[in-house]
Amino acid sequence: MIKRVSFTVGVAVAIFIVAIVVPISVYRSRMAKEHELYASLLLKPDGIANVGDLLKLKPDIREVFFVTNASSVSVVVTLEPPKGTRHTYSGPPAYIFDENGRLVGWSEDTGDDTEFWRKWPISSTNEVSKERVYDIVEPVASPEPPPRASGSEDQG
């Protein structure tokens, strides 16, 4: 009798473990695939040496920040996350440029990147107009700024 109860309890524990472990494994696998898709859609810093290179790719700019540190000014350009994925990100991807427009850093997900926040503490107090990013583009690599909205052109 004790062996039968022991066997039954063992089977019940095994079923319980399988009922918990399998769904968690499936969920983790799905999340990993979503993250891979998200990462594959990001504009990687390969081939981006300066602001002009980034702007030539016509990214969907989310925000631009000027961050002043001890002896330098950095320009942080955040982009809208890529579309076509259900991946939950905690912060937008960001490209960091020095005052001459050269790429000095990149973050795939600024929300989880503690090193990013330590080096470039962005906030609404140092946010600037998106168009300011064109002010630091090196003249050689300068793409044309986007056309102004209708009604703002000179009617001369």
Image: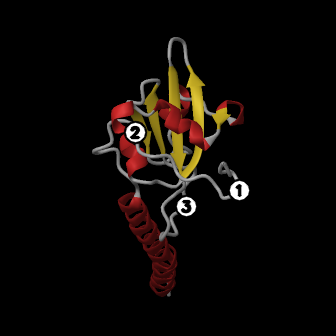
Residue farthest toward the left in the current orientation of the protein: 47
Label 2 is placed on what type of residue? Ser
Residue 76 in percent (x, y) is at 52, 35
Q: Name the residue under label 2.
A: 142
Looking at the rendered structure, the number of numbered marks drawn on it comes to: 3
Question: What is the C-alpha distance between the residues marked 2 and 3?
Answer: 34 Å
Residue 16 in percent (x, y) is at 52, 78
Query: Does residue 153 lie above or below 134 as drawn?
Result: below
**Rendered image quadrant of residue 48:** top left
Residue 20 in percent (x, y) is at 51, 74
Q: Which of marks 2 and 3 is nearer the N terminus?
A: 3
Q: Residues within 10 Å of mark 2 (few under 14, many from 20)?
A: some
**Rendered image quadrant of residue 45:** top left
Q: What element carries label 2?
A: loop
Q: Residues within 10 Å of mark 1 (few under 14, many from 20)?
A: few
Front one among 81 and 153:
153
Residue 68 in percent (x, y) is at 58, 20
Label 3 is placed on what type of residue? Thr
Identify the image's colour scheme: rainbow, by chain, secondary structure or one colour.
secondary structure
Query: Does residue 60 lie above or below 85 as drawn?
Result: above
* Residue 151 tag number: 1
Q: Earlier in the sequence, mark 1 or mark 2?
A: 2
Question: What is the C-alpha distance between the residues marked 1 and 3?
Answer: 38 Å
User: Can residue 114 be seen from the camera position used here?
Assistant: no
Q: Mark 3 points at which residue?
A: 88
Question: What is the C-alpha distance between the residues marked 1 and 2?
Answer: 25 Å
Front one among 116 and 31:
116
Label 1 is placed on what type of residue? Gly
Q: What element carries label 3?
A: loop
